[in-house]
Image (tube, rainbow, N blue to C red):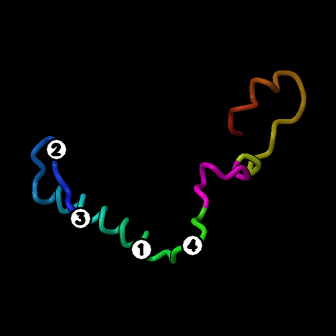
Amino acid sequence: MNIKVLRGNPTAEELAAALAVVRARAAAEAAVPPGAPKPRDGWSDPSRIARQRLPQPGPATWARTYWPG
């Protein structure tokens, strides 16, 4: 694996931190057996929308549709 700095002049600490993140990510990907389904991302999970109660019908309900609480 080759990593190249295209811009800037990172310090040794910054470069070490970036490489630690890349290596940890690669190790996590290698730990998943081939062909195993990957976990769904929370942002794409449709059930997260239904976790909150919808506003009750009434005057100005449309104004509260996208506001939490």
Q: On the rendered image, what quadrant is the N terminus found in? A: bottom left
Q: Distance between the residues labelled 3 and 4?
A: 24 Å
Residue 37, given in percent of the width and then of the height, sits at 60, 68
Q: Helix, strand, or loop for circle 2?
A: loop
Q: Nearer the viewer, residue 46 or 58?
A: 46
Please say whether residue 44 is one of the residues in the magenta stretch: yes
Q: Distance between the residues labelled 2 and 1?
A: 27 Å
Membership of 62 in magenta stretch: no
Residue 1, label in figure = 3
Q: Which of marks 4 and 2 is in front?
A: 4
Q: Which residue does the image show at 79% across and 24% down from the upper left?
A: 62
Residue at 18 percent across and 62 percent down: it is 16
**Comes first in the chain, label 2 or label 1:** 2
The answer to which of marks 3 and 4 sits earlier in the sequence is 3
Tell me which segment is drawn in magenta.
40-48
Pointer 4: what residue? 35
Kind of residue at disc 4: Gly
Residue at 30 percent across and 62 percent down: it is 22
Residue type highlighted by circle 3:
Met
- Establish if 40 lies above or below 54: below
Q: Is residue 64 above or below residue 32?
A: above
Q: Which of marks 3 and 2 is nearer the N terminus?
A: 3
